[in-house]
Amino acid sequence: MRLLLRLPLIVILGGVGALAMVLPGLYAHALDEHKTGSIFLGAAGIFVILAAIVGLATADRPEGPRARSVLLTMLGTMVLLPAMLAVPFAMALPDTGFFNAWWEMISCLTTTGASLYSADLLPAPLHLWRAIVGWLGGLFMLVAAIALLAPLRVGGFEIMSSPYGRSERFERLPRSAEPSILGQRSHPAFQTELADPVHRVMRAGRVVLPVYAGLTLLMWTLLLMLGETGLVALTRAMGTLSTSGISPVAGPAGQGSGMAGEVVIFLFLIPALSRRFWPGGGELKASESWIEDPELRMAAGVVLLVSALLFARHFAGAIGVSPTGAKGVLDTLDSAASAAWGGIFNGLSYLTTTGWNSVEWQGARNWSGLSSPGLMLAGLAMMGGGVATTAGGVKLLRVYALARHSERELERIVHPASVGGGGLMARRLRREGAYLAFIFFMLFASSIAVTVMLISLQRIEFDSATILSIAALTNTGPLAGAIPLTPTFQGSAGMAGAPWAGWAGLPALTKAVLAGAMVVGRVETLAILALVSPEYWRR
């Protein structure tokens, strides 16, 4: 363990990725796909040896705990590590090319879940590899949020941090006779563990990994009990906890396990709404009770509002046809309940940027009379899930801060001399929190505009460019399939490619732009802009 703590973080992550290649290799041999299995096991051995060599060469290299090293490590993880993960994928699909394999791994590691390939044409070991990479990407973001981003006050932590860099509460000074802890904190060993990113990542990983893996195992078991096959159940569990939405089959989430399976998926999507469900991130708690948690209340209100709008649209002149086409009171009530569940499930799925559709989603569309309610789903994906979770988007806490600030400003128009109140956290959210949230929202909107402009240069239709940009920046890859797009056939991903799905047929330059958008959406714009600041590069 001491040797690992002396290695650069990206070398450790490379070793973890190399060891993960063993699982699809063994699975391929179990399916008698020995060529694919040998590719993965051979790549695992080579990259483990390379990681060991690079680790020995960089073990004693002094590295200061500067913010730029942390941010560069995160960028390197999202850009360079997929190049290593793409090697066995490209070798298993020789006609796809290394660039497409690298793009696919970026999509998985950033938990975007967009795929260049048809689910029916891709071998099962490659589906498992995609799910594992997405699961590891979710784990990395859960750990990096509290170990790397929280000390820099980015990634959503800036909303709840003290604007003065200290506690705003009055505290009693310790007596002179009491033993001081300053001497312990000034000890070199303590300072190293506190400041070194590797120590922080290891410490956070020890508390996050058991919970993350335990929930994945529990969900896998529940889906197996409900009738899902082994690979589908495992990838569903991984795709749910990591919010990557990666699945080896096309179609709705509950096509094998029914509505009971969708209820299980729905429950396990809730941890993506707040850091309260994961270890660490205590400074993000804006309330003591989870019932009063602003992110959870905001998520519940938004999901119920969207489902209510879809349900009420039926009574505003939509067609009165049930999903099966049957008539009668009982069938109408059944179609109404199915439509309500389809709206609620899809609302939560896209709010957490997972992007799975319910088996009743088509019934919800028929009930509402809207042929393509995808713009609602795009709006939910832009809003995003909880801060410091695996979800992408703007994040619920930022939206809540803007909403509270707007509410307070309207109240001051009516009562200019009123006092807001609400406590320390409420005042902080309405003031500095709303200010920083507005800055991030404008940066996010600017990122969408720039991405759309770059994609449109390749003669992609404007509506398709907009949806693809939102899907990439919010890390919601399945969003491109929820909204009808005009397919493009300017590129290819090989025989297993699916250009009709909206991604594979894009030209190489457009794919590179979207890959960059995925990284920007995952690391967040504020963290990347911090690298441009001269303060972070000043010695």
Image (cartoon, rainbow, N blue to C red):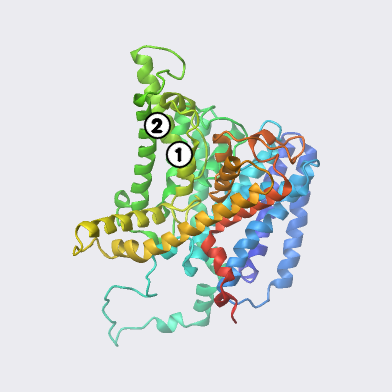
Give amino acid for label 2.
Leu
Front residue of this view, candidates 214 and 476: 476
Q: Which mark is residue 376?
A: 1
Please indicate, yes or no, whether residue 147 appears anywhere in the rendered image: yes
C-alpha distance separating marks 1 and 2: 10 Å
Earlier-in-chain disc, 1 versus 2: 2
126 lies above or below 527: above
Residue at horizontal 37 percent and vertical 23 percent from the top: 317
Between residues 503 and 129, which one lies in front from this camera angle?
Answer: 503
The percent position of residue 217, horizontal first and vertical second, equals 52, 42
Classify residue 364 by image quadrant.
Answer: top left
- Provide the secondary structure element on which disc 1 rests: helix
Question: How many numbered callouts?
Answer: 2
Query: Which residue is rendered at x = 36% and y = 83% of the image?
Result: 180
Are the residues at dot 1 and dot 2 in contact (C-beta closer than 8 Å)? yes
Give, as a three-letter code, the residue at label 1: Met
Residue 125 lies left or right of residue 254; in this view the side is right
* Image point (75%, 47%), residue name: 88
Q: Where in the figure is residue 529, as x and y percent of width and height?
A: 55, 66
* Label at residue 310: 2
Number of residues whose C-alpha sits closer than 10 Å to that of mark 2, classed few (under 14), some (14–19) or many (20 or more)? many
Residue 167 image offset from top left, x and y in percent: 34, 73
Find the residue positioned furthest to the bottom: 176
Q: Which mark is residue 416?
A: none
Element under label 2? helix
Up-down relation of residue 384 to residue 64 (above or below): above
Left or right for 277, reference 452: left
Image-quadrant location for residue 467: top right
Mark 1 surroundings within 10 Å by alpha-carbon count, few (fewer than 14), some (14 through 19), many (20 or more): some
For residue 515, side relative to residue 42 (left or right): left
Q: Establish if 197 lies above or below 186.
A: above
